[in-house]
Structures are given as C-alpha cells and as structure tokens.
Amino acid sequence: MTGQDAGTTNRQVWRTESAGHGIDRSQPISFGFNQFRLEGYQGDTVASALLANGVRLVGRSFKYHRPRGIFGIGSEEPNALLQIGSGARREPNTRATVQELHQDLVAGSQNHWPSLKFDLGAMVGLAGALFPAGFYYKTFIANPKRWLWYEKHIRRMAGLGEPPADTDPDDYAHANAHCDLLIAGGGPAGLAAALAAGAAGARVILADENPALGGQLLLAPQRVGGIAGHAWVEQAREQLAALPNVRLMTRTTVAGVYDHGLFTMVERCADHQSEPDPHQPRQRFWRVRARKAVFATGAIERPIAFANNDRPGVMLLSAVRGYLERFGVLAGRTAVLFANNDSVYAASRELVAAGLRIEAIVDTRPGLSEAAAAAKADGLYVLSGHGVTAARGLREVHGADVAPIDADGRTRGAAKTLPCDLIAVSGGWNPAVHLHAQSRGRMAFREDLAAFVPDANGAPYASAGAANGAYDLAACLAEGFAVGAAAANALGLDAPPPAIPAAVGDPVGAAPALWSVQAPKGARCFVDFQNDVTTKDIGLAHRENYVSVEHLKRYTTLGMGTDQGKTSNVAGLALMAAKRGEAIPAVGTTTFRPPYTPFTFNAMVGGQTGEIGHPIRRTAAHDWHVANGGVLTDAAGWSRPMYYATEGLTPQQRIDEEVLAVRNAVGVVDVSTLGKLDIQGPDAAKFLDRVYTNRFSNLKVGRGRYGVMLREDGRVYDDGVTMRLADDHFHMTTTTNHSSSVFQHLEYLLQVVWPDLRVFVTPVTEQWFAAAISGPNARALLADLAPEVDVSNAALPMMGMAEGRVAGVPARIFRLSFSGEIAYEINVDADYGLALWNGILTAGGPHGLKAYGTEAMGTLRIEKGHFTHAEADGRITMDDLGLTGMVSAAKEFIGRRSLGLPDLVAPGRKQLVGFIAAEGERIPVGAQIAALDDLDAVQDALGHTTSQAYSATLGRHIALGLMKNGRAMHGRKVFALSPVLGQRAAVEVVPPCFFDPEGGRQRG
Amino acid sequence: MLLIPCPWCGPRDETEFVYGEAAVNRPSDPNSLSNQEWTEHLYFRENPKGEHTERWFHRAGCHRWFSVRRNTVTHVISAAWPPGQEPKP
Ligand SMILES: [Zn+2]
C-alpha cells in the first residue's frame, strides 16, 4: 500500500506508540504533499512525516524516471528531492530528510509527468537505455550540433525541479567571525572537543548541520555517563551554552575549507519556518577565520548494490533505526535486514521491540558472529553467508530475493523470495572526509573498515570520531576530548584533564568490503541513485577505457549529482578497482570540492543585490540629468547621461541637436567622472617628466599641458591634461576608465621604483565637480557667469587657467578643449556642483546653451580625431597615433626604452586614420576595412574601425580606425564591412581629423 | 582566500588588495641593456612551484605597495616587507 492510495486521510499509520524523543506529539502540524493534506509533529522532517503517513514513493529518478523513495535520514540523501514552498519561495531539489516540517509546508515531488504514479518517462526507462553511460560524451562531443535536436527532449526528461519564477522575497545575509577553534559536527566527538577546548578558555565555534546537536547519539539508543545518549547531549549542550567563549550553531553547515584558516558556513536561519521572522534573513552565509579546526563530521553508511535496489522501501539500516529512535516512525511492516556488520543485530532488537516483523537477517559474512548467534538464540531467522540479490516489486518493495553468496558477492546457490515491504541495508561506513580532503589532507585506506580515513600526516586540521574511522562511541568521545584539548594547548591555553564519560554504544565490528551482489542478467543495480549510475555503467566505462576515477566520474556522471556521491563514490571506485584488478587505494579518489552540501545562490550573494551588488557612482548633477530626460549609461561605474531625450525627436535627432549647439552656440557637459589626482611635492615636476612622454618641468604656473603616459613596454596607456597650480603642485586628469589604475601606477613608481622622490599623490576625483562649457559662445557665457574673472583671450588663453567665482561658486577654470571649440572646464567643490550646474543652465539661455551627453561628446571628439581607449587598445604606440612630436628625445620616461624595439618600429604597423562614408551610407559598428565590396569574399582586412558616429556637422557618417600603413592611404576608397551584422559602407580614408584641422576655433 | 599581512595594517582579507606581479626590480638604467635583456625584463617571468616573491597593493587600505613571499603550492605566506626592506632569508 502507498500513502497516495490513502487519499487525504492524515492518520499517521506508521507512527509508533512510544519512541521518538525528537518530536513533540502535543504539537501536530498539518502540511501538504502533492494533492494530499497530511499531518506530522513538531520536530519532524518532511521525510519522517511522510514515512509516518506511509508515503514511500516521493519522486522519480533523474534519467530513467524510476520510482524512488526515502533512502537515508540526513544530508546524504540521494533520492528524496522535493520542491518545497510555492510561488516566489518555491525551492527545488530540497532533501526531504533535511527539511524540517512546519505548519502548512507545501512539498511536491518533481521530475514526473504527467503524475507521480504514472510517469511517461518511466516507459523510456523500461523500453531501453535512452541514456547509457557515456551518452553525453559520445553524442555531443563527437557532434555538438546534435545537442540542438536532443536538448528539448532531454530538458523535459531529465529535470531536477523547477526554479521559482519570481524574485525571492526573503533577505539573505553575510557575516564574518573569528575563533580559535572551529568544530564541524556536533555529534559525540564534536561535543567532546568543544567541552575540552571550551573548558580551557578557547574561543570555540561548534557548527552542526542538523537542528539539534547530538549526531548519531540521537539516532540509536546508546548510553553515555550512565544516562541515555540524547540526555547526555542535552547536558553537554547546557554546559557549553553556559560558556561565554563557546558559540553553538545548529542548522549550520561547514561548507568549504579555504586557505589561511578560512571556512565558509551556511546557516539556515528560517528554513524551518514558513517565512523568516521580521527583519531576519532566511539564510546567512558565514566566513570564519579559525586558528584551528576539528572535523567531527561523522560517517555515512553505505549501501550494497543489488538488483532493483532503488525501489521505494530499500533504505539504509541506520536511517531505519534513526526514524524509529528520533521520530517514532517504523519505515515498514515486514523487513529483511541486509548487512555485512554487527550493527544489524542491535538494530533488530530495537525494531522488533517497536513491532516490526523481521522476516530475516541476511548477513554476508560466513559463520555466526557473537551478536548473530545471540539474535539466532532470540528466535530471529539469520542467514549467514547470504546476500539480497534483488528487490521485488515495481512501485515499492514487495519482497527480497535471497541467495547464498561468496566473499565477492557472487551467488553460490538458488535464490528464494522472502515477502517484505522494507529492505534495510548496511554495507559499513565511510568517514565523511570531505572537509579534511578540501583542506588538502591526504587519505589513507583502512582495510579493516574498507574505507578511506584522513591521514593525519601533514594534515592542517584534526579529524575525530567516526570522521576519523573511530566508529565506536567510547572511541569517538575519547578522540573528541583529546583533539579539543590538543587544540587548546597548541594555542597556548591550558586544557584541564578531561573527564571522559563511560559510554555504551553499538558493537560495530569489522565490515568486510562488499559493494554489490551478483545480479540476475539484465537487472539494474544502482550505485549512484541520484544520477542513475548502475554497476553495468561502471563496467561499460571500464570496457571503453575510462578507467581513471576522474574519467569514470565524467563518463558515467557518478557522484555528480546534488549529493556529490555521498553514498556512492567509494562504491563506484571500489567497483572500478575490482575491474582493473587493483587495490582500492591504488585507484584513488576523485577531488573533493566545496560545498559539502548544496546551498542557494542567494546565500552566496547575500545582501549584495541590485545597487548594493553593483554600486553606482553619481555626480552632483545627477538628479538634474534624470529630471531633464537624461538617458543614462554606465561608464566605469558612473551613471552618465548619453543624451537628453526630447519628445518628438529620435535619439539621433536629439544627439545632432546637442552636437550642433556646441558647434554653433554653446553646450555644457558634466565631466566630473574624469579621474583627478592632486600631485604635490618638491619633486612633483621631475616625477611628471618621468611618467609622461613630454616635458612638464618647464610648464609655467597657471598653465596646463596635454600629456600621454606609456606603459613600460612602450604602448600608450593613458592621457589627459595636467595643470600646474604652483611650482610644487599639479592637478592631473586621467581618463574615466583608468583613474584608479593610474593612481596605483603612480604609487608604484613612487614607492617602489623612485622612493627618493618627494611627491604625494592624492586621488581627488570625488572631491571635484566639473562642467565643461564649449562652443563659439562659451566665452560670453563665462563672462556672464564669472564677472570677477578676466576671460579675455589674453588673460585666459588656450591651456591657461584662472580662479574665481563662477555662478557664485569658488572655482578653478581650466581652458582646454575636447570638442575643438572655445571651451572651459569649470571645477568646483563637489558639494556645490549642482549649484554651479544650475547657474550655468540659467545663465546659458540667452547664449543658446544646451546640455549634452556622452554621445554628442563622443561625436565631437571623433570629428576632432582625439583618441580614446577604443583606439589606444593596449597595442598602439605614439607613432601609430601620429603623436611622435609629443615624445621628448631629451629625457627619460617610463616606456622610452621600448620605443626602439624592433616590433615597435617595424614597417606595416596599423596607424590611426579617419573614414568618411559615401553620401547616405552608414558605417557599421566594429567594421573590418577591405578592398572588395563583398561581405562573403575571403579577403585580407586592411584595418578596422574603432569608433563611429553620424556627424551632424558634416552631414556624413564618419569613423576613426586603425589601418595598416594608414597615413599613406589617405584618399583611398575602401569598404567598411561587418559580416556579423551583414552591413557595409563605402568609405574614403582621410586624416584622423574631420573638422577644423588647424585648430583655429578652439584658440579663438 | 588569502589573509595577507600588510606591513602597515597587519593581516587583512585578500579582497582589500590588488595583485601586482612578480617582484621584479626595474633596471636602474634601461638604456644600458640590450634589446634582449630589456625584453626579458619586460616579459620573462619565473613560474615557480614553491616560493614566489610578488607585490601587492593595499588598495582598500593604506595605499601601500609591498612584497610578499608566498608558496604557490601551499599558499603559505612566509614573509611580507616594505619596498627595499627584504628580510634576510
Ligand atoms: Zn595596509
């Protein structure tokens, strides 16, 4: 029977009368699963509540759409992935075994269509192997185009839930912490380590992924210090909570280990609630710097593969025990227990006492252990030297085929079928070595456990307890106290001798290596449930020579699911080792990478979304730009208006208006984003001589000069105008893009290369607001704005400067021109920027003033042939730009030594040119320059365009570009082609200045 | 993520810094070098497996350049010093 058949009844038919110390039976909780309304208790996980209701079929598998149930009890769960929540809070791929139940939780199974019970994809699984191992490899690497055909089918068939469509309504936070000792895992070993180090006064963080501390002590009846294990846990918790130097963090997974003591943790603050408390985050992402760490992460029980071992009703034995002990749930009515170790006998007593009928205990080991003999004496049916060869049943387990087997799992006799609805399997344990491996610790293989354990040799952090291969409870506690005390002592603290409590746990005994039982022909034995990897797939990988574990993983996708192979990796590589005829350690393990368990992108991003994730820099006039139709763009993190939209005009018409205002009247543009560096000191002039190609030491006070900086390899790096404010004081401007890197460059030179120079460089970009007014009417406008300042050409010539009030604001006025018109750059304290801007706009009316944006500014500079980083792309020299005249031969500067290198003076370099399009033709963006007007012809590119614009001044489309031997090509008719855009234009090569080449207008 | 010991500010998170490059000193007189020697200075860098001396800039801190000796295998930083003050090994 399945829970689905039970309709909407909510009787918890599989809940026991007693047991279940982790639930509060006085607090029933109502929740939804698919179309059913069910009931559980406070303290349940979704998995325990579903099992309590007898629900076993919870999902369909990834590739074959096979029915799947709940397999484990914690974060190792490979099968029971559900969608939790609805709407914007819906989260796919949530493990039912981890998700805590809360009132009105909505859970849904995923990866099925049209319904969970009847799934069309499963027909594919039955009909044959649509996706054999290596399917992706063979199909798509050989012929990537096939993906286009397969994609929609695969996406439909092989899904893992649906992401929410809307923006997440919850907050996520980042937090940092420092501690002496970080302990990952709050089971017996972790608690012991915390008690020891905490008593010594160490600052301890103890993090556990579960809602309650205790680990394995909560999942099976054991005794510590004469009391029940879970009661001792509560005692230890109270003791630790009373210590101010110890921080206990539950629902917190240590996800990653990084360099220099950095650990990442994810705290699920509100996943156990329907929504976070007011002002609280849903999840918190922690970065912890710890001086020491202890990994007490426990061990993960491993299955033994047999035919149809993925049927709902096949579960890990420790999970079956745990559901009974912690949640008071029996995961079946009639069970076959299948194990290779003695834990099965302790489990059988607990399960029988709770009312489970045990059909047989199938022990792979020949002969009877002491515990086995005791169980037999109690009347249990013990089959030693046997294995389960197959699970019977289609949608869930109805029986188990059992046969005698040898030590390698080969059948040695006929199978008989035992009726049962539960097969609980234990193949031993694998220490959870993930964090140890992430910390670059090496692995050792222990034959007695048939498991990899941390190699303490050279390991940066200690492991303790089951994570270290110490499965016995007493050993867990002893190791925990020892590593906690050792960590404290190593930190110079004095750990008191620990009082280790007496412990009574399970006699675990040896677990011989057994990974799979020989299956009937054609049957599927699953190794990796989540990715549907079978023993046969591993054989296929071996036959096709994908024998290294890393190749095995990628070829079969073993261990590549959201569970990262927690229950399957070791089995997979053990099976490969057997195929190769080698020992397991010789085959090795794949690399363990963070995170230990998956977590949301939201947690990683935290609060860094929107403008906090991408801060926007705004100038003082920003609000004016927005209020006046400014269409904004991002320029090196600054928000700048491209143009000011006007009703009835297209963007190009509006840009044309702005350009023509500058050419015919006057325009104003916000140039606050230019980098500005204040340079002072007795050696400031000498320093500038060394960083610019031209000389600055002979610049008069009150005058400015345009300068170009090179990189040490002789390529053009940055440019701008520098004004001399005093003998020992300069105001340097850089391009907007490079303002930060130029500062870094200058500091490098001053601190590392020429520490003897007495110069201070201060970045002052944000301290100044700057507006440039340019155009034939600019001088008249400035005269109105600054009546105290003599703005005549004699007093304030090109590259001159003045100080005085502009629009009532104290200002530095630099006369320099980017547009080729008479222009003044007015710099004021940024706090007065808007006052200046408004003053200019108010005074400008009678002069025909228009504000212009970056598009018009770009058009004006292209008309004048000024280069930007589009032209000087890091490969370009001064000579390529036609600026050899600016290179001083009489002084040393950065980059000079490289100017004579053969490559920089080789003939045939690309040189800066202009292109002017034929009447009515438009030069495509990013065009190649070619001799033939043919978009399809294979032909050599003669050059390329770097910037293009429609010049309203000329009535033509124009461009700047780089062309081989470009200066010798003036007058040539060539073609600008963009095969990508399918556009072309006939163009003429011209000198890279389209307007007023003599420069008379800007000096006027 | 590295914890970088700025000689002025103490250990700080890697995100505060900008990586410079291998700590190669600029020749005091580039003109005395042949083209071969100069281009080797410009472009040729060791890529050691092990100890590596490199420069970092404390961009979101004191704006100082300094040198760091870092093991490229283990990322262990064994020393950090201001320009020109390399400690004796
Ligand atoms: Zn610093």
Image: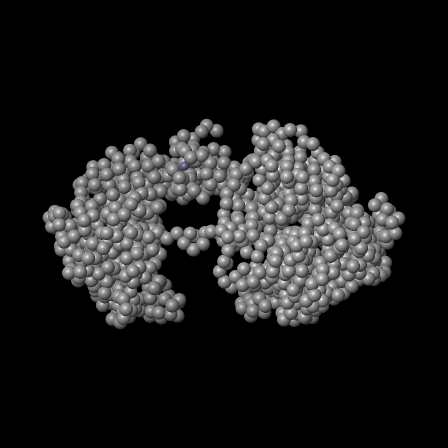
Left-right relation of A271 to A801: right
- Which residue is at the front of the view, B7 or A42? A42
Q: Residue at x 42, y 52 (%)?
A: A612
- Which residue is at the front of the view, A538 or A255? A255
Q: Position of residue A155 (x, y in %)?
A: 57, 66
Q: Is residue A913 visible?
A: no
Q: Residue at x 21, y 50 (%)?
A: A826
Q: Position of residue A196 (x, y in %)?
A: 64, 34
Q: Position of residue A15 (x, y in %)?
A: 73, 57
Q: Is residue A852 visible?
A: yes
Q: Residue at x 33, y 69 (%)?
A: A984
Left-right relation of A804 to A646: left
- Which residue is at the front of the view, A844 or A213? A213
Left-right relation of A606 to A518: left
Decide: is A702 above or below B83.
Answer: below
Quarter-of-image position of residue A241: top right
Decide: is A692 above or below A485.
Answer: below
Which quarter of the frame holds ligand 1? top left
Quarter-of-image position of residue A763: top left
Q: Residue at x 50, y 58 (%)?
A: A168
Q: Position of residue A615 (x, y in %)?
A: 39, 52
